[in-house]
Image: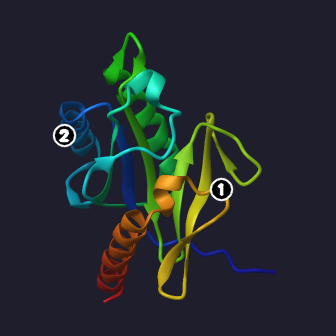
Amino acid sequence: MGIEKSHPPVILICGILAANRILLDRALHLIQDEWGPLISSSESIPFTFTEYYNKEMGTEIIRQYVCFERMIDPVEIFGIKRRSNQLEQRFISVSGRQVNLDPGYVTLAKLVLATTKDASYRIYGGNGIYAETTLYFKAGTFCPFEWTYPDYEEQFAIDYFNSVRAEYKSRLNQLKA
């Protein structure tokens, strides 16, 4: 029989897609009002990995990843995703949503994203929200799975999330001290 133990807190992250720079800046302010200050953010880059969002957001979509100062219990991610869905509603236009928020978290072993879409590799967390391990950590770096979204496989994303993991590791060590 295994011994149950609680999971250490994890570091909250969010992937943001926005139809333009103004909306990206508005989304950044909104999520900080909701979940607190950021400790880092990736560069913002053109989102050219798929045309999935083009009908709603156009063709000049911007991608950025952010990491919050806030540490959470991993099970909180399900409620955070539900709230991010509500926040996205503030950015609806005639063509659809103009901002997409993908909250998740980083541990020493993995990056987890929350989603509303079911798949064979996703775990149901209640209230229509699922979680997936998007990246796993091996041999000193994050690595993708076959289902990992293309923009999370890119080296700039891997480098960013490796730096988030390093920050997380440092914060965990401080908690243990």
Look at the picture and state if 36 lies above or below 108.
Answer: above
In this image, 47 relative to 49: left or right?
Answer: left
Residue 85's place in the image compared with 6, above or below, is above
**Which is more toward the observer, 24 or 40?**
24
x, y percent for residue 4: 66, 74
| Cβ–Cβ under 8 Å for marks 2 and 1 | no
Gap between marks 2 and 1, in whole Å?
30 Å
Q: At x 42% / y 35%, what residue is drawn?
A: 83
Q: Mark 1 points at which residue?
A: 147
In the rendered image, the quadrant that contains the C terminus is bottom left
| Three-letter amino acid code at the position of disc 1 | Trp
Q: What residue type is labelled 2?
A: His
Badge 2 marks a residue whose secondary structure is helix
Numbered badge on residue 29:
2
175 sits to left or right of 82: left
Q: Is residue 78 visible?
A: yes
Where does residue 85 sit, x and y in percent of width and height?
Answer: 45, 31
The residue at 25%/32% (across/down) is: 20
Q: Which of marks 2 and 1 is nearer the N terminus?
A: 2
Q: Which residue lies furthest to the top in this view?
A: 94
Badge 2 crowding class, 10 Å Cα cut-off, few under 14, some 14 to 19, many 20 or more, is few
Judge by depth and name the residue closer to the eye, 166 or 33: 166
